[in-house]
Image (cartoon, rainbow, N blue to C red):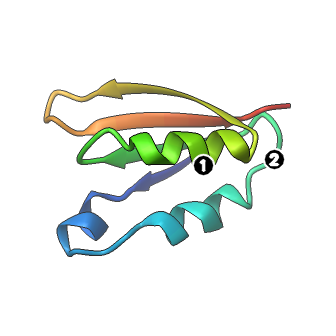
Amino acid sequence: MAQLDVRPDIEKGGDPFNKIMVTVNTLKPGETLEVIAPFEPFPLYDVMESKGFTHSSEPTPDGSWKVVFTRRK
């Protein structure tokens, strides 16, 4: 499983989208990417679905969101 905590990027005013896409492009069928974000990343869901991923998401105790994207086989 690849993991990206994008909270620091967003806190600095950055956009982590390119970092996420670079990581996504390295994943093979069945592999997963866990993204930790300060909010639920709704716009990312459609992008990832169009790239062949499913997702599950859950809030964390500190108010962040953990989203696991899995590439369809």
The number of discs equals 2
* Residue 47: mark in rendering: 1
Residue 68 point in image, percent of width and height: 52, 34
Q: Seen in the image, is 10 located left or right of residue 32? A: left
Q: Seen in the image, is 31 located left or right of residue 63? A: right
- Which residue is more in the foreground, 29 or 21? 21
The residue carrying pointer 1 sits among few (fewer than 14), some (14 to 19) or many (20 or more) residues within 10 Å by Cα, namely few
Please report contact status of discs 2 and 1: CB closer than 8 Å, yes or no: no
- Which residue is more in the foreground, 1 or 11? 11
Residue 34 point in image, percent of width and height: 50, 42
> Looking at the image, which residue is at 22% across and 74% down?
13
Amino acid under disc 2: Lys
Residue 41 point in image, percent of width and height: 38, 44
Q: Secondary structure at mark 2?
A: loop
Amino acid under disc 1: Val
Answer above or below: position of 24 versus 42: below
Residue 64 point in image, percent of width and height: 23, 39
Answer above or below: position of 42 versus 37: above
For residue 15, which quarter of the picture?
Answer: bottom left
> Looking at the image, which residue is at 42% across and 27% down?
57
Q: Secondary structure at mark 1?
A: helix
* Residue 28: mark in rendering: 2
> Looking at the image, which residue is at 26% across and 43% down?
39
Mark positioned earlier in the residue sequence (2 or 1): 2
Q: Seen in the image, is 72 located left or right of residue 9? A: right
